[in-house]
Amino acid sequence: MIYETRSPDHFLVPMPITQAAHRTAREFTRQQPTPQKAEQVYRNTLAVYAVHNYLQILGISTNLTAGDSWNPLVRFALDVADLEVTNRGRLECRPVRQNETVCHIPPEVQTDRIGYIVVQIDDEQQEATLLGFVDSVSESDLSLRELRSLIELPTYLQHVRPKVILSQWLEGIFHEAWQALEEVFAPRQAHLAWAGLRNLRSSQIKRAKTFDLGLLLNQKTVALVITIQPEMAETPTLAENMNVLIQVLPMGEEEQLPPGLKLKVNLECESAEVEAREADNLIQLEFSEPPDTPVVVQVQLADSVVTEELIV
């Protein structure tokens, strides 16, 4: 049994599978083309419900219907079992059977997740046992011996920083921290922020996020502005590159950035950096990458650094 592979003090959470979970799972399976796909969707749905109910008990807010697992087109095409945790990101809730010691993580869910919870579904599908979690995966087979205790989960979720999925902006999905320019800037500064990508098109989307760098800025704030624009192609495909412009601008009455403020962009195989000089009113970097590319953006002044993790 899998319980014998766990340490004695490991914290397992049994959760009854509710009638609501079964009703929803049955509804989703009616839309599937084969019995195998129907069974996959059924078990995924039960796992998502179990994690949702557990987080509700802990007082952690979730949006049960916001994930890909509730989207009929995505659910039909992919093996997804995600649950959105409010203002944090999406947990993947992967089901396993009794006696299994390895959890399969499909390639399509190995990014764009803040964590992975493994849920054992009993053979009668009456009880789900939450076995543990990991914060990330690097391969398709996750050994249950690698799971962290669920005792750590609330603290982990409290401190996790959600990654920004830039492609979701094309669908009108924005984290609340990323605001429209008119909500952040005065008209003069907004005009600067709209200066950017060399080929302006109506498909541009811009969002801004404010932050401070502590005492080095005398409690004054600057803004990180991100502009995205899909590359145009004769035959649009999911593999199109995304043009991305990263800018840093001063806020409020300030007209210039502090000299020495740095903007750095780290891609998988390269990085670039720009530094504010005297009288600079913005600094910026531009790049073009395919979907699902991870990007790390850093804004630094002396020893103070703000980091934003993005997915193109």
Image: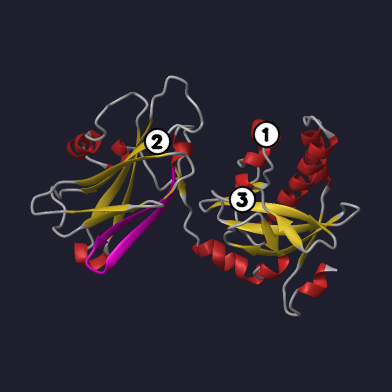
Specify whether 15 is left or right of 183: right
Q: Which residues are magenta?
A: 295-312
Direction right: furthest residue: 124
Q: Nearer the viewer, residue 269 or 29?
A: 269
The CA distance from mark 3 to mark 1 is: 24 Å
Q: Which residue is mark 3?
A: 62
To which quarter of the image does residue 207 belong? top left
Q: Which residue is mark 1?
A: 77
Query: In the rendered structure, are the residues bearing label 2 and label 3 in contact, judged by CB atoms less than 8 Å apart?
Result: no
- Which quadrant of the figure contains the C terminus? top left
**Residue 119 at what x, y percent from top left?**
75, 58
Q: Nearer the viewer, residue 136 or 151?
A: 136
Q: Which residue is mark 2?
A: 242
Direction front: furthest residue: 269
Q: Nearer the viewer, residue 241 or 114?
A: 241
Name the N-terminal-most of marks 2 and 3. 3
Q: Residues within 10 Å of mark 3 (few under 14, many from 20)?
A: many
| Kind of residue indicated by mark 3 | Thr
| Kind of residue indicated by mark 1 | Ala
Q: Residues within 10 Å of mark 1 (few under 14, many from 20)?
A: few
**Residue 106 in magenta?**
no
Specify whether 69 is left or right of 112: right
